[in-house]
Amino acid sequence: MNRPSPNRAEAGQLSLRIDLPQGRIGPGKIELLEAIDREGSISAAGRALGMSYKRAWDLVDALNKLLANPVVEASIGGYRGGGAMLTDAGRNLVADYRAIERAAQRAAGPRLLALARRARS
């Protein structure tokens, strides 16, 4: 029986992890940076992604130590609480990662379709 040809969404998506000598950058860390940019704080970003503040802070700290310039600047809490924002280095990291991800998805597209055609239904 011939199955219909899968469309791009049915073919699957790549999950990209970049291993640098100094550490790893993957989808979870990038999603966290995007959430910090959206939410304006590390704790709110962690909550939005279902992770503890400690886990979110540890990931931010790892990224800040990985690159030459910090990716997140946090302000100390007070009456209204603290906050956090992406630095230019953080925005550039997200943009670079997403561009690499798109290029890899385009390059792998035909192979992903081939794999999807051979996968069990």
Image (cartoon, helix red, strand yellow):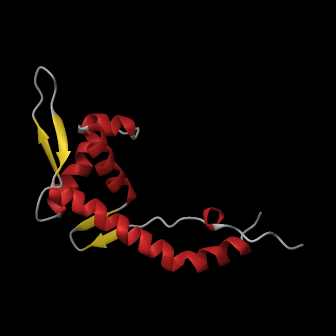
Judged left or right of residue 120, residue 36 is left
Q: Which residue is drawn at 70% across and 68% down?
A: 6
Judged left or right of residue 58, residue 5 is right
State whether residue 32 appears in this view.
Answer: yes
Q: Where is residue 95 in the image (x, y as percent from the top left)?
A: 30, 63
Q: Quadrant of residue 80?
A: top left
Q: Quadrant of residue 55?
A: top left
**Viewer-proximal residue, 81 or 59?**
81
Image quarter of the N terminus = bottom right
Q: Residue at x 27, y 43 (%)?
A: 36
Image quarter of the C terminus = bottom right
Q: Which residue is drawn at 50% across and 75% down?
A: 106
State whether residue 52 appears in this view.
Answer: no
> Which residue extends farthest right?
1
Judged left or right of residue 107, residue 21 is left
Q: Where is residue 97 in the image (x, y as percent from the top left)?
A: 33, 66
Q: Where is residue 70 in the image (x, y as percent from the top left)?
A: 13, 56
